[in-house]
Image: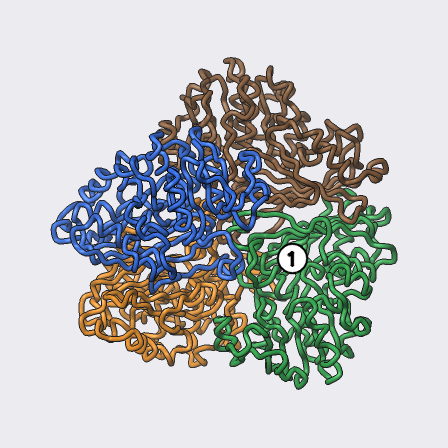
Chain colours: A brown, B green, C blue, D orange
Amino acid sequence: MKVGIIGGTGYTGVELLRLLARHPGVSVQTITSREQAGRPVGELFPSLEDVHQLVFTDPAEANLSGCDFVFSAAPNGVAMRHAPRLLDAGVRLIDLSADFRIRDIDTWERWYGMSHDCPELVDQAVYGLTEVCRSRLGSARLVANPGCYPTCIQLGFLPLLECGLVEPDSLIADAKSGVSGAGRKADLGTAFSEISDSFRAYAASGHRHLPEIMQGLGDVSNQPVDLVFTPHLLPIVRGIHATLYARLNAHAQAMSVETLHGAYTDRYDQEPFVRVLVPGAHPDTRSVRGSNCCRMALHRPQGGRIITILCVEDNLVKGAAGQAIQNMNVMAGFRETEGLEGIALVP
Amino acid sequence: MKVGIIGGTGYTGVELLRLLARHPGVSVQTITSREQAGRPVGELFPSLEDVHQLVFTDPAEANLSGCDFVFSAAPNGVAMRHAPRLLDAGVRLIDLSADFRIRDIDTWERWYGMSHDCPELVDQAVYGLTEVCRSRLGSARLVANPGCYPTCIQLGFLPLLECGLVEPDSLIADAKSGVSGAGRKADLGTAFSEISDSFRAYAASGHRHLPEIMQGLGDVSNQPVDLVFTPHLLPIVRGIHATLYARLNAHAQAMSVETLHGAYTDRYDQEPFVRVLVPGAHPDTRSVRGSNCCRMALHRPQGGRIITILCVEDNLVKGAAGQAIQNMNVMAGFRETEGLEGIALVP
Amino acid sequence: MKVGIIGGTGYTGVELLRLLARHPGVSVQTITSREQAGRPVGELFPSLEDVHQLVFTDPAEANLSGCDFVFSAAPNGVAMRHAPRLLDAGVRLIDLSADFRIRDIDTWERWYGMSHDCPELVDQAVYGLTEVCRSRLGSARLVANPGCYPTCIQLGFLPLLECGLVEPDSLIADAKSGVSGAGRKADLGTAFSEISDSFRAYAASGHRHLPEIMQGLGDVSNQPVDLVFTPHLLPIVRGIHATLYARLNAHAQAMSVETLHGAYTDRYDQEPFVRVLVPGAHPDTRSVRGSNCCRMALHRPQGGRIITILCVEDNLVKGAAGQAIQNMNVMAGFRETEGLEGIALVP
Amino acid sequence: MKVGIIGGTGYTGVELLRLLARHPGVSVQTITSREQAGRPVGELFPSLEDVHQLVFTDPAEANLSGCDFVFSAAPNGVAMRHAPRLLDAGVRLIDLSADFRIRDIDTWERWYGMSHDCPELVDQAVYGLTEVCRSRLGSARLVANPGCYPTCIQLGFLPLLECGLVEPDSLIADAKSGVSGAGRKADLGTAFSEISDSFRAYAASGHRHLPEIMQGLGDVSNQPVDLVFTPHLLPIVRGIHATLYARLNAHAQAMSVETLHGAYTDRYDQEPFVRVLVPGAHPDTRSVRGSNCCRMALHRPQGGRIITILCVEDNLVKGAAGQAIQNMNVMAGFRETEGLEGIALVP
């Protein structure tokens, strides 16, 4: 199958290329970039110089319409400009940006600070959290790939909400991400000398991923969801660790940790890319470095009312490129794990 | 004034020496270590070779009783063996370990896994969170210097509890610490190749600092306090960042962020070592690297029911050695900031 | 083919398992460890829990003799105890330690501080720098896999010595390695708080890899070789960067950089795992992170008498486990790149 | 004394402010920045908010002429525009840029890519390597503060050249620097995700500091000097480690390491900011973090012809702001160590 990539000069673009290079079912035909048009991919990304004989092409000239699948790895606001044309041409589009993630257009426009170019397409989009939307992918033509934090946080809370075990308005997500999540760019805030050997929160009063997470959790809860989400910047390259808190409701407070854990294993045991560890475990971000897996563990501190879930993923893989390919696999009828079997790089 | 240090071969020992070297009112007379007895301090710690002509002395031979103040920087279980003798000799003891922090002996013995040698002294001890205990330091002979996490977390929650603004049983402290907090030792869990470029939580089901924090917060709350405390290991050398969450009670929910912020400025504006930033700020750990200051900022996400406090300190300074010297200054009648005016090392 | 691993609880053991898990031609049958006997591999190394259903076995009980190939990933001094028995049983042994690398037994014993158990086997051993020994691997039964620094440094100097372009007694290798090269162990010197945000040299007066490098370079030079080798500890997990210096002889001084570069492309263009970059390039260690490739570039500062070669590899892959598998591939008649086609993980 | 700072928004500006805040003899009157004019210093640099009530002033309006000393912490090309006017006004100018470092104007213009505005002032300038120029500082009105790499490398080689112990055309400086040396700026090359957990050389074919180092070493050698200088980027915030190599001449080859070491202790024992460690030691960059000290140690590998010197400094302190203040102290008649007695921050 022929694959194209829009806006491939960022870190998710590099990851798509790395993972697709070893995917036996696809061939990357074209990759676009206005700034780098004409430049070989291997020149910008030396680690890829032997695996793709690709040259960046100006989006205006790239033959994206001739592809079976197109991934948009461009910043917010770009995929929505290409989408109508591509969908009309029969291309199946997987967008790694936020353009099609949020069903309420006003909410999207408010958080993302721009007008939406094709709101009518948003309803068509399948929100691509594979463990939730799998059955709808087979016929999907437009997939809104989730954000990195939303993937981890939703997977961590899902069983609790689906099984009605917590007060849905008590959710707290304290999340920490490696800096590659901020993108490949020249920015003083993510300069090495500003980040290394330090740590801080950011957007603690409101981050754009909040409405996306609330939408997803609201979909699986029969009561209104309320969430406090605090992102932080970790001085590491890749990895997200979300520490999630929720109040058990009266019904669930009577359960043992093993029973609560059972809700997780029931939900995820069949999932190839979610691993539920034994209760009390402490997953580390490096255990999924370069892998598409999300690992989590439950804690019930002091046997009290709060349940804590520790959840890790690689923000560029399960948080972006890996999940996009996982969705493509399901859409195309490949084995869901095709091209995603890389083992985490540890140490 | 003559000062002695018990167990000075760890990171808090190094910090005490660094800070005391520039304290005009004291002279370090003796520093003990069984393992390193006979070895010059500058040989173990090259950064100190010009500032102290000290040699490590075996504790059995050190003239600690001849000191005005003794700091114990030894592991838990050591200070309590020296305390009776030293107090009898008229020495004023500041213990950086947990030996005298917890008033309930059973609780202490359970969490620390050993019998207490002199429980009768625990009542005498002043719990050395300076911003709370200042008035009792003048006559104190035994000070239990707080743990690193407890310092940051209590300072962050204090105004909310003192002013009765939150539900005291809704507290969550998601804390992240640099690795020096684990001590100077050979341990696979804190080996560079196990920690670097990674992140994880630890002791998420219960950490020894929990009873200490609950005791301190309970002292300032007129209702029972309940706290979930999740520590994490940051791949940085120094620094603690605590992200604190609490539910505003009905009374406080009606307040603006500025009013809530006012509770903090009222409480801390006169404090030389606590800085309350403008609401919505994001303090970073490097802004207090090597400094005795604790910096914090309030957030009220979505104007909702949860108040978030971001709070940073240097775990070796305000979280240990710096606070110990701050206490000594008050006890001895020095300017409280004497020897603690170092500016954070940034970048 | 059946493969066994002796001493598999270190970082090279983890890497062997990661790489062999995706090698279609082999199956890992047994992996030994005295300390961890009985423990599942996935328990010690969570990243591997899905890929190997192996349990560590005590070496005394492991069926190593039933394997076609055995890799020894144990510390120095262990392989030599197993070797006679295994070779007699028809096993082909690839030793990742130094036990069989140095032909002069006195030199080995002096640098490694122990007596050699089976010096008679050393002559049989093929020194496993694949790009040099390939033709001898087909019939080899015992391979001494090179050290991490020696691999990088020899590959970097080889064309200059083989083509007689430099004064062989003028060689300087200034090498910097990530900390995983020191091994997976509890050691104060490699504790996170001792290494992070710092840098130093070590063994600058003489490192055990020196005689190995001199032996290898001496083999390809028709004049005596002299080398100054200074290792340094980099605060990164993986990667070696060697900056190599040599004096061009009179004959070579007249050559252009392109001609000198030609000596490198002639030597390495056909090599699957050596990449010669354009002159003047600056390879970074991350460009080969997790990959078996060695990348290098030439510089001739000020057009002067010194030629500088910048050379990078992943110390755990091309510097250990990857090269061991590369050797096994040649020995077994597999494609040389089988199982080693992983793309570097960047960023 | 009144001090002004030109271009104070970079890392050397922050360091000057941190160090000068604790200097009893000076008061910082004015600090300029075009971009940040009107903004309080403490807003840009929170760690300084309590120590200076300064506001950045536009250079056009700042009263620099009313200062006794002015430090220029601006990029290359700025100090030379202010110098004539300031010197005429009787200000003593210490320039931290390269504008006045190189006596040969053609060389400077070639390496720095701009025309020199006031070449006639270059002869007046004293090259501010304090350990060399001390006697000329008392009457100096214009000081060209050395670059970070040149400070470390010249101090390391000095005794060998002054005592005629090496072949001056055999010098190799393999230097590694923390990223703060690249400046406080938005640049993809120094973005966290591009640097962390990686290592590479840069400018290996020729770096601007080369002519400066050769000029300084040429001044103390009676034979022509030739140097190969390879800089590298370390994934740490501060610190330079230079590994220096030189060939001992016939005369020196007969000397013991102790005698060679004696040349260093003779030269530096009286120096407050140079520490010569015992032969065979390995200084680490953290041992001088935040300190004005330069620490070094000699090695003579295999008792051979090459002498290796390991030399560390903090690039922002002894490599920039600290040395500038050290020079000011001598110029003003203060104790040379005034304000520079901070102990390195370790761990």
Which residue is nearer to you in this view: A43 or C100? C100
- Left or right: A51 with respect to B45? left
Q: Position of residue D157 (x, y in %)?
A: 29, 68
Tell me if I can see residue C144 in this picture. yes
Residue A231, by quadrant, is top right
Residue B321, by quadrant, is bottom right
Instruction: Give me the residue at 66% from left, 83% from top.
Output: B67
Which residue is nearer to you in this view: A169 or B201? B201
Which residue is nearer to you in this view: C17 or B121? C17
Which residue is nearer to you in this view: A217 or C5? C5
The residue indicated by pointer 1 is B312
**Disc 1 residue type?**
Val
- Left or right: C184 with respect to A294? left
Question: Quick check: B301 above or below D52?
Answer: above
Question: Quick check: A41 above or below D124?
Answer: above
Q: Residue furthest right?
A: B222
Tell me if I can see residue D39 in this picture. no
Question: Quick check: A54 above or below B55?
Answer: above
- Left or right: C117 with respect to A23? left
* Mark 1 Cα-neighbour bin, 10 Å: few <14, some 14–19, many ≥20: many
Q: Position of residue A337 (x, y in %)?
A: 54, 26
Q: Position of residue B342 (x, y in %)?
A: 58, 69
Question: Quick check: B88 above or below A83?
Answer: below
Q: State which chain disc 1 sits on.
A: B
Q: Position of residue B164 (x, y in %)?
A: 84, 55
